[in-house]
Amino acid sequence: DAGITQSPRHKVTETGTPVTLRCHQTENHRYMYWYRQDPGHGLRLIHYSYGVKDTDKGEVSDGYSVSRSKTEDFLLTLESATSSQTSVYFCAIRPGTGNYGYTFGSGTRLTVV
Amino acid sequence: AQKITQTQPGMFVQEKEAVTLDCTYDTSDPSYGLFWYKQPSSGEMIFLIYQGSYDQQNATEGRYSLNFQKARKSANLVISASQLGDSAMYFCAMREENSGGSNYKLTFGKGTLLTVNP
């Protein structure tokens, strides 16, 4: 299994505060993704990265920013958290050649109060 | 328009019976991949099976098989001999591979919650 860890696993924060979620991989994969999961919506792509310093927006990127200064780390930042950003956040990595299944982190449950 | 449609919010099946979870997709890209993931109540995303658009045969992985009907744009997951541990949310996803700048993004359906009854 590709090594991918998310931190923190759980977080409660107040409206208006900045929050950063971290995704760390040990497999040197090029492509990394941030999704949010909400009931009735499945998983929706927030941002993704196709290399160090190369990132782009997904379908629900408003209110979020990302950074990737090293291959192994992909950070998701909520600049000023809102209650609508209460969600479960998943990081995923695209596997290398010959392996099809994208690997997901364990998720971060974020609650904005 | 939704790219991935899962029309069954919930499904029930008796233990040891087979069940089919529906997935239809929408794309004009001739090259794409279809995925199924399982999410048990513990929350992790577990990859089950993959089907490429050019694959000639339906994918199978143990008790999981994918009924791929390209002309109908459907990629239904079939679970044979259901077990109690199969109770989970199941997601269908698609990756379009030729669209400019696709960067291998996965687009997910809204999921189907499967309950296996003893």
Image (cartoon, coloured by chain):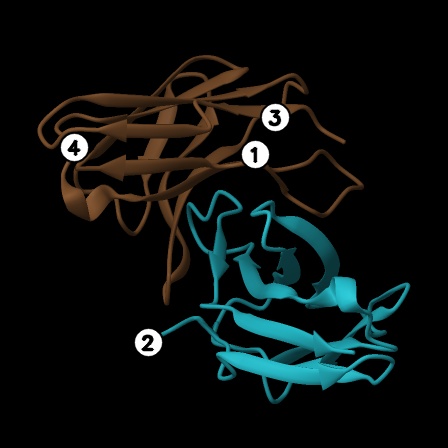
Residue B1 circle label = 2
Residue B69 appears in view: no
Eyeballing the image, is B7 above or below A90? Answer: below
Q: Position of residue A69 (x, y in %)?
A: 40, 10
Horizontal arrangement in the rendering, residue B87 relative to residue B84 (left or right): left
Residue flagged by tag 3: what amino acid is it?
Ile
In percent of width and height, residue B102 lies at 45, 49
Q: Is tag 3's residue or tag 4's residue first in the polypeptide sequence?
A: 3
In x, y percent, where is residue A36? 38, 46
Query: Is mark 1 in CB contact (under 8 Å) with mark 3?
Result: yes
List the residue tagged with mark 4: A81
Residue under disc 4 on the same chain as residue under disc 2: no
User: Who's the residue at 18% across and 48% down the image?
Assistant: A84
Q: Which residue is mark 3?
A: A4
Q: Which chain is cyan?
A: B
Q: Quadrant of residue A85?
A: top left
Q: Nearer the viewer, residue B28 or A26?
A: A26
Q: Residue drawn 85% across and 77% down?
A: B80
Give residue B65's position: percent from left, percent from top: 81, 72
Q: In the picture, which quadrant includes the N terminus of chain B?
A: bottom left
Q: Nearer the viewer, residue B37 or B1?
A: B37
